Structures are given as C-alpha cells and as structure tokens.
Amino acid sequence: MKTGEYLDKRDIKSRSLDELKEEFTALGLQSFRAKQVYSWLHEKQVLTFDEMTNLSAKHRELLDNEYYINSLAVERKLVSAIDGTIKFLYRLRDGEFVESVFMRYKHGNSLCISTQVGCRMGCKFCASTLLGLKRNLDPSEMLDEIYTAQRETGEKVSSIVLMGIGEPLDNFDNVLKFLSILSSAEGMNLSLRHVSLSTCGLVDKINKLAEYKLGLTLSISLHAPNDEIRSQTMPINSKWNIEQLLRACRDYFEKTGRRISFEYALISGVNDSDECALELAQRLSGMISHVNLIPVNAVKERGFVRSSKQRIKRFIEVLEKNGVNATVRRELGSDINAACGQLRRDSMKHQ
Ligand code: SAH
C-alpha cells in the first residue's frame, strides 16, 4: 500500500496545517477553512466530513472527493482486572494490525503506541520483530491510536510513549510529522515534554533527531553493559556498538539539555550478574541519565527467562552504590500480558 493515499484520495489527517492551507487554496477554498477542518480532525477528532458543521454541504462534498479521513477499528480490547490497563488491538484500513496500551497513573493516562507494522530490528527477546517489518505507519495512523483510545475510554491521554510495535527512528519522517501535529496548538496541543521515544540505537537518526531539539525524552534500549552480550541479543549492535551509541547520547544531551533514559531488560543468566551491573555503572558514569530496569517478558519462541526478584534487587543495589540512578519499571496489566507484539501475532495466526 502506498503510504498517504487510499482509494486515490489523500490522507487529510497526515497533513500539517500549513500544507492544508496550501492545498485548500489550490482547491479554491479560503485558507481559514484549513484551520477549521484541522481543528475538527485533531481537536474535536471527528470521523466524517459531515460532522464539520461550520462547512457548507458543497465544501464537505468537495473535501470528501479529495481526501479520506483515516480511522482504526478496534479488533480486540483487553481490560486488566488488576489495574484497569487496556490493551487495544487495532485493525488498519489495509487489514494489518497494531497494538496500543492505555495505562492509568496518578498523574494521568499514558498511551504506549506502535510506530510500524512489525519491525526489522531483530532483537532476540522481542515478539514484535519475529515476522519482520510489513510497513511504516502514517502520521494519521499514529494519531488515531490516541484518538481512538480516547474515544473508547472517554478519558484524556496526557502522555505518550513510542514503545509499542516498531522502531520509531526507522520511520523517522512520519514520526516527526506525527509529533508536530500532536503538539500543535490547533490540534491536541500535547507538549512534547509528555512524550518518550524509545530506540534500539539507530545512531545516525539519534544525531539527526538532536538537531530538532525537541522537548521529548529519548529512551535508549541498551539491555547490556558490553558489546559481547549486546551483540548476542541485538543485531543493531554490529552496526553501531555501545561506544558509538553512548557518544551519540552524550552529544544528544549536549544539544538538547534533555536527560537520557536507558532501558535494561533483565534476562536471567544473560545480563543480570553483579559484574554486569558494575560494568553498566562504569559505562554510564559521568552521564546525566536514568536506568529503567524491566524484568524481561518471556516470549515463548525465545526461551528467555526473567531474573528473580532477589537478583533484580541486588542489581539495582550495585548500580546505586556506583552512582547510577535506577528504578524497576512497575508492571501494569500483568493479567492481560501478552508482551508487546504478541496480540498482533496471535490474531494473525487465527486468520
Ligand atoms: N524499537 C524501539 C521501541 C519499541 S520496543 C526500541 O527498541 O526501543 C519498547 C521497549 O520494550 C524496548 O526497550 C525493547 O527493548 C523492550 N522489549 C522488547 N521485548 C521485550 C521483552 N520481551 N521484555 C521486556 N522488554 C522488552
């Protein structure tokens, strides 16, 4: 499927306000109409042109002929009985599936969204990458993960994490466009301070992202203290090793002033020894950073087992004794837990 087009129509929800103004002028519409339509799409989040009641029937028809309004179907919705976390399996207009997770925190609701259909990064512990990459998500599809979750729950989403299926920096242009629409004053107006973007370490794209000086939090999926262990689980490490990755992180911090967050999934017997913790602390010394420890989610095909509670406690002690800030990520929705990417894969098996 060609991105941004469907049934020979243009994807109106992926257009910036400036692009809409230009295109509307070419269609013979006054440019203030662009602002009205943009606000219907991104602030009020309507699903049809007919709901845009400050446009004439003629204009609505004109737009309907030129553009489509993207939407997602909720294929499955799993609600945790423990903490109300909701996992959405969304069906896209070409029949592909992606997942989002809606999490409730004291400070507000957070949504974890997907950025690609599948992934080509090949991390050994990850379910999302088992079947490779199908395609990139359009900006409109990422926005609709949020708009649909808000509609379904009747609640506002106040922070976003790009940690669902896919590698956000492998879909760089669409992700940037998504972020700019998301944070626009005439749209959802969500500050990028409330957005985290997680990457397995595409160094060229981290350098490129730094140039934009966005307020978001960059998370790095590190998962190992040295190249030997990281290369075993993350193929990207043979392209850019830890030293190159950490250099990009230091540069990123210098350019943006934003503290980097490191993800470290603890896998029993692989990366969870005291020596690993010490080596990790040495690697990160002098960096303004934070380490998020995640007990690895077992993925059937992979055979990795999570570290014991005791081991995790000890790992964190060693980090802290050596001056590294670390927390263990609170697990939400453990009763509906199919680790990320597993719901999509299950539904594909049943087809
Ligand atoms: N591609 C991006 C974002 C998606 S993955 C990235 O790699 O960062 C989101 C996070 O979940 C990453 O830190 C990833 O390494 C981690 N992850 C993947 N599979 C996991 C599993 N089975 N258990 C724990 N964390 C996992």
Image (spheres, helix red, strand yellow):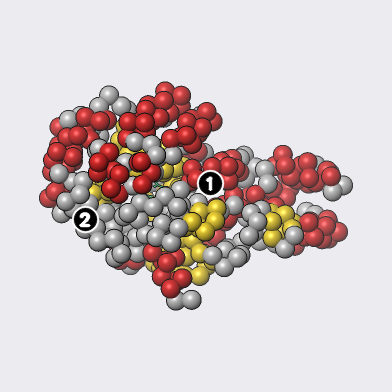
Q: Does any portion of residue 10 appear in the rendered image?
A: yes
User: Label 1 amino acid?
Assistant: Asn
Q: Is residue 122 left or right of residue 156?
A: left
Q: Secondary structure at mark 2?
A: loop
- To which residue does mark 2 refer? 306
Q: Which mark is residue 62?
A: none
Q: Secondary structure at mark 1?
A: helix
Q: Quadrant of the N terminus?
A: bottom right
The residue at the point 44 percent across, 76 percent down is 350
The residue at the point 50 percent across, 51 percent down is 115
- To which residue does mark 1 refer? 171
Closer to the camera, 152 or 173? 173
Give the image location of residue 151, x and y in percent. Answer: 55, 61
Q: Vertical placement of 262 versus 118: above or below?
A: above
Are the residues flagged by discs 1 and 2 in contact, CB closer than 8 Å?
A: no
Q: Does any portion of residue 82 appear in the rendered image?
A: no
The residue at the point 25 percent across, 37 percent down is 226
> From the Cβ of disc 2, is ligand 1 less than 8 Å away?
yes
Give the image location of residue 122, x and y in percent. Answer: 39, 52
Q: Vertical placement of 287 versus 236: above or below?
A: above
Q: CA distance from mark 1 to mark 2?
A: 30 Å
Q: Is residue 233 left or right of residue 96?
A: left
